[in-house]
Amino acid sequence: MAKRKVLYEGKAKTIYEGPEPGTVIQYFKDDATAFNAQKKDVIAGKGVLNNRISAHIMTKLEGIGIPTHFMRSLNMREQLVREVSIVPVEVVVRNVAAGSLCKRLGVTEGTTLPQPIIEFYYKNDDLGDPMINEQHIVSFGWADPYEMDEIVHMAYRVNDYLNGLFAGIGLRLIDFKLEFGRLFGEYGEVYMMLADEISPDNCRLWDAKTNEKMDKDRFRQDLGGLVEAYQAVAERLGLIPKGGIISGGDINEQLAAGLEEIENELAKERRLRGVKRPSPTGGKPRSV
Ligand code: ADP
Ligand code: AIR
Ligand code: ASP
């Protein structure tokens, strides 16, 4: 097979040139990083689980009308996605206080927030992803007020939907991070869509009964058992058989490979729909 061109080597994923113009391949690595890559490790099987979980969640979100970059699963570690121009803003939605919110404001971890809180961070590793607000985003041209309206609207919808999805499998959605990207249409029109991944690498998920952490905090806080926790999430979502597909760092490749078809059956429908999407809302921009 011809060697594929690497377009971008990230901390947790590699982006390869896709088979057709306008597409790229997301390859999920086993690398885990935290605190702006000051802490690093390789955790066998993490990439396989995140690939599957993210494919599933993106498919579900498409199903409720949220445009996403996801097209279809290719194999255990890869998915075909639409190539987008990433908005350099990390959108964090919080339901319960944890992580940097607690550090910054002295709030006790686990405090339920009276309403979901949206935060923005400038996606820039050299600067350590500093927190920003909508005025920074608009002033520096990272997104315009109409796009911010769309982004905020989608972020709330994703939060509502995912809260229900996870509650249904005994998990509390504490917080999560989203990335959005622009797809340029034939006539210069712009479609804003959800990109990157949604997985326990960028969501905090606690067991509803025990409050056990089932996300990347297991790595950040040296709690151990990361793959077991991610497997339990995938298992509860019905994506892998009971007992899991990874044990002692070994991946049951045959079992893992056979699972792709589930997502792809759903993806067929999506391919028919193509990239044409309703044009962005023409509503008034939010005052910023
Ligand atoms: P990081 O850049 O923080 O190291 P990753 O290792 O997850 O993160 O790398 C994946 C990169 O690909 C991210 O920078 C993300 O913004 C970018 N990306 C995600 N989805 C798409 C897409 N559909 N098209 C182009 N780039 C994307
Ligand atoms: N996140 C933010 N930057 C990278 C990631 N993965 C996610 C975390 C957490 C949420 O955003 O995984 O779910 C908030 O992170 P923090 O560190 O600001 O509390
Ligand atoms: N992945 C990011 C990093 O490497 C942030 C994090 O998840 O903590 O720093």
Image (spheres, grey):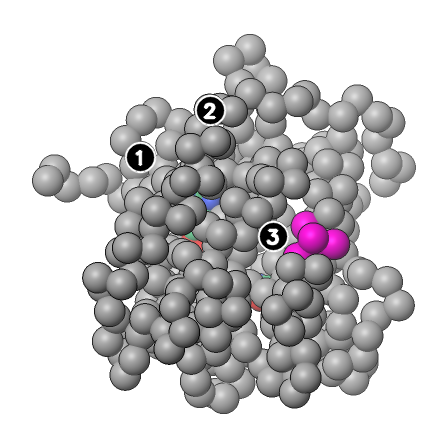
Q: Quadrant of residue 247?
A: bottom left
Specify the amino acid type for callout 3.
Leu
Residue annotated with mark 1: 18
Q: State the mark number for residue 178.
A: 3
Residue drawn where x is 36% and y is 63% of the image: 47
Is residue 46 in view? yes
Find the magenta span and give its range.
158-162
Marks 3 & 1, CB-CB < 8 Å contact = no
In the rendered image, the vertical position of residue 267 relative to residue 95, given as above or below? above
Q: Please, which residue is most extreme toward the left here?
A: 1
Mark 2–mark 1 CB contact (< 8 Å): no
Q: Earlier in the sequence, mark 3 or mark 1?
A: 1
Residue 2: image quadrant is top left
Image height check: is 92 above or below 191?
below
Magenta span: helix, strand or loop, mainly? helix
Distance between the Cα atoms at labels 3 and 2?
26 Å
Give the residue drawn at x 66%, y 65%: 168
Q: Quadrant of the N terminus?
A: top left
Q: Is residue 160 magenta?
A: yes
* Mark earlier in primary sequence (3, 2): 3
The residue at the point 65 percent across, 41 percent down is: 64
| Quadrant the C terminus occupies | top right
Please say if the residues under marks 3 and 2 sit with CB atoms less than 8 Å apart: no
Residue 192 is situated, as x and y percent measured from the top left of the image, at 61, 33
Q: Is residue 23 left or right of residue 275?
A: left
| Residue 239 magenta-highlighted | no
Residue where numbered disc 2 is placed: 272
The amino acid beneath tag 1 is Gly
Q: Could you say where residue 232 lies in the image, as x and y percent from the top left?
A: 48, 75
